[in-house]
Image (spheres, grey):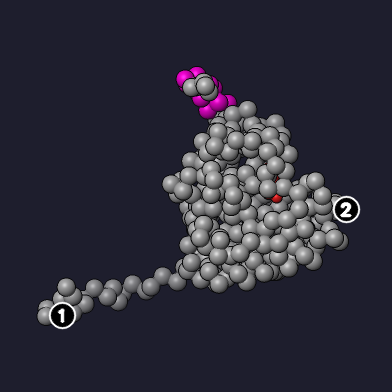
Amino acid sequence: MADLDDLREGSRFGEEIAQSTDGFFMKGCNNMDWGMKDRMSRIFNPRTGRSVMLAFDHGFIMGPTSGVERIDLSIVPLIEHADCLMCARGILRSLVPPTSRKPVCLRSDAGSTILTELNNNVIIDVQDAVRLNASAMAVMVAVGDAATEALTIANLYNAVDAGQAFGIPVMGVTAVGKDMTRDARYFGLAARVCAENGSSIVKTYYTEGFEKVVACCPVPIVIAGGRKLPELEALELAYQAIQCGAAGVDMGRNVFQSEAPAAMIQAVGGVVHNDMKPAEAYEMYNDLRASSQSCFQPQPK
Ligand code: R5P
């Protein structure tokens, strides 16, 4: 019952304390609506402003490539260590437990595979992203690829329009055009094109001069890991990117193809959230790896 009979007059107005007008913690996101900011805060840790996104969307273009043949065995045990999951909707519905309570950056374009020409894509219906409670939609953008550049940029801005209607941020994923040089000038251009077309997050690759790529991109950047490297090198890559201003990693193969994936994702987390130096994070990786090997491992039937 509302206390209509004994309505108490408010007395705690705190008139002497001005209401905070602090901005939002992620760059370029201050003018977002509440739902967008809420989703960004699920992906990026408000304490550090950074995120360890676990990418396992590779199968949607490559099929059961190494490390993602059995998502239930290789990826699900890593979920607890990730800040955000990046995958396609089929894998999400079939194998990711909805009880994981992790934000999802949903792969939201689909089309051609490695067997033909990549990036001839369309975007999924935003209503499916809403149904899946996606915290972001990821869309590939092939800047510099004559065959698919216009199509993929159109995909991006259409996804941004659709996402805006429901408060879902879009992550522009830079696919490197076939003839492009992987340098800061190219990645700076590609990242900026994504941001100019409305991306709230940009995913790209680390390269020398990465601080320029970060500086000219008005929204947070995360880096993909790329092909599998020795663990120490992958940690160095993450460290360099973070020190240049990246807001995190969206890493796949360097985690799930590692000799000890759970140890690796935790070491990456140390670099991303605690500014651990690569050598220190590598020590952490080795310690975790050794302790997990000494535990009893149930054998498959
Ligand atoms: C690329 O578009 C794929 O979607 C992957 O999500 C991305 O490359 C990150 O994975 P990796 O760290 O294996 O490169």
- Check disc 2 and give the amino acid type: Asp
Q: Taking 95 as reference, is 300 above or below it?
A: above
Q: Secondary structure at mark 2?
A: loop
Q: Identify the magenta region.
A: 286-296
Q: Nearer the viewer, residue 177 or 239?
A: 177
Q: Secondary structure at mark 1?
A: loop
Instruction: Identify the residue position indicated by label 2 in the image.
Output: 179
Q: Residues within 10 Å of mark 2 (few under 14, many from 20)?
A: few
How far is mark 1 from mark 2, CA to CA? 72 Å
Instruction: Identify the residue position indicated by label 1 in the image.
Output: 4
Q: Position of residue 17 (x, y in %)?
A: 33, 72
Q: Nearer the viewer, residue 238 or 135?
A: 135
Residue 135 can be seen, yes or no: no
Name the residue: 61% across, 64% down. Answer: 125
Name the residue: 74% across, 65% down. Answer: 153
Q: Taking 45 as reference, is 286 above or below it?
A: above
Residue 156 can be seen, yes or no: yes
Name the residue: 56% across, 61% down. Answer: 128
Left or right: where 60 falls relative to 95: right
Residue 68, located in which quarter of the rendered image? top right
Q: Nearer the viewer, residue 141 or 119?
A: 119
